[in-house]
Amino acid sequence: MTDTDWTPLFLLRTVLFPKALLGLRIFEPRYLDMISASLRQGRDFGICLSHPRGDGHAEPELVGTLARIVDWGGEAGILQVQVRGQKRFTIQDWRYEGQLAMASIHPWAEEPIVPMGRESQPLHAILEDLIGKVPAAGIDASSAGMVLAQALPASPEEKQQLLVLQDPLERLRRIVELLSQRGGA
């Protein structure tokens, strides 16, 4: 395996979902360098939920999402970046190169495009607020679940559980359950 097969990882206490947007404030030199290289090379990087280790580093969850920079700007010492989630991936192997986590990844196939079920009707109003009435009218279950999961007021661990699901209708059912528990649907 060559070094070009390794993907840089942004380890966060949040989860990025495919098709969803996430804003990042970047100020650590390792991530500023990573973002700069990503912009220069037009290459995606991985975002993974992380957990602290005893040695001052973090350890990634084994399922993450490729991120593509769609907008950027900033001020002195702080870069503001907006990314859109691409494909999910499984980490096959990972290591630290200096302060930056790098991984050999296996991208997942796209989920099937299926219509939203009747039980997902309560989610349409939320989708309209998030993406607009016209886009929400024709959205499929996978896209809806990813956008909703990104905006969901849930713990990172609950979001990670939604990320690893491979059935878009099951993801929507779980989102409805989580919102019901919080009094939101």
Image (cartoon, rainbow, N blue to C red):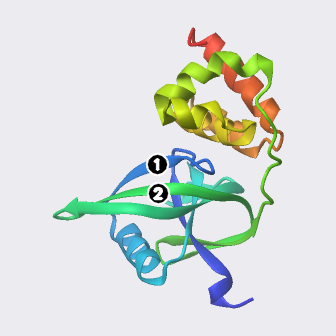
For residue 105, the mark is none
Establish if 152 lies above or below 30. Answer: above
Q: Is residue 10 left or right of residue 105?
A: left
- The x, y position of residue 4, in whole percent, is 63, 87
Q: Is residue 143 visible?
A: yes
Given the image, on which type of amino acid does mark 2 rest?
Answer: Val
**Crowding near the residue tagged with mark 2, few <14, some 14–19, many ≥20 C-alpha atoms within 10 Å:** many
For residue 22, the mark is 1
Residue at far left of view: 76
**Crowding near the residue tagged with mark 1, few <14, some 14–19, many ≥20 C-alpha atoms within 10 Å:** some
Q: In this view of the protein, which residue sits in the foreground, 88 or 12?
A: 88
Establish if 39 lies above or below 148. Answer: below
Q: Is residue 71 left or right of residue 90?
A: left
CB atoms of marks 1 and 2 within 8 Å: yes
Q: Is residue 153 visible?
A: no
Residue at 47% across / 57% down in the picture? 83
Q: Is residue 155 left or right of residue 78?
A: right
Establish if 86 lies above or below 123. Answer: below
Residue at 75% across / 33% down in the picture? 171
Residue at far bottom of view: 2
**Is label 1 in a helix, a strand or a loop?**
strand
**Is label 2 in a helix, a strand or a loop?**
strand
Q: Quadrant of residue 121?
A: top right
Residue at 72% across / 21% down in the picture? 120
Establish if 79 lies above or below 147. Answer: below
Mark 2 lies on residue: 83
